[in-house]
Image (tube, rainbow, N blue to C red):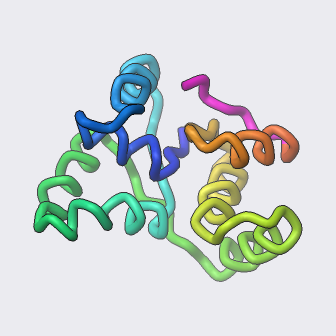
Amino acid sequence: MVLDANVVIALLDEGDGLHERAYDLVEDHAWDEFCTSALTLAEMLVRPASRGHADRERGTIERLGVSVVPVTGRTARWAADMRASRRLGMPDAVVLVTAQAVHGQLATFDRKLRRIAQAEGLDLAEP
């Protein structure tokens, strides 16, 4: 399962309005393999880094078993095409093409990204 940044951000922040949904999603899929793109990992760590907690939160992400999928040249080209054709921001385009590349289910709370992922034929995790 490919995790979008918003799922992990909500999971890490108990005060986030989506925290319970993120927790339930991860619990419901505890036996799945989780992954995310390197760019998405960076996005997940922005808030913790601003608070001086990036190492701690990265440790939490690692304990969840989230593997990091590199952004290769091919991924970058696919993401650029996806961004141009679907009017997505680069982080959303990268997580989408990562899910396509690994043939994984996508977990996201982003409605626009969910619609586009469905149109692209991706399997979506129910939040």
The residue depicted at 46 percent of the width and 52 percent of the height is 5
- Relative image position of residue 92 (x, y in whole percent): 63, 60
From the viewer's perspective, is residue 41 above or below residue 90? Answer: above
The residue depicted at 65 percent of the width and 50 percent of the height is 99
- Check if residue 125 falls in the magenta segment: yes
- Relative image position of residue 68 (x, y in whole percent): 42, 59
Quarter of the image where the C terminus is located: top right
- Check if residue 126 falls in the magenta segment: yes
- Relative image position of residue 44 (x, y in whole percent): 37, 58
From the viewer's perspective, is residue 110 above or below residue 51? Answer: above
- Relative image position of residue 110 (x, y in whole percent): 61, 44
Does 124 sit left or right of 121 as displayed?
A: left
For this orientation, the residue located farthest to the bottom is 73
The residue depicted at 35 percent of the width and 23 percent of the height is 20
Please provide the residue range marked out in magenta.
Answer: 121-127
Does 38 sit left or right of 23 as displayed?
A: right
From the viewer's perspective, is residue 17 above or below residue 119? Answer: above
Closest to the observer, 15 or 86? 15
Does 118 sit left or right of 96 as displayed?
A: right
- Occupied quadrant, residue 1: top right
Chief secondary structure of the magenta portion = loop
| Numbered marks: total | 0
The residue depicted at 60 percent of the width and 57 percent of the height is 95
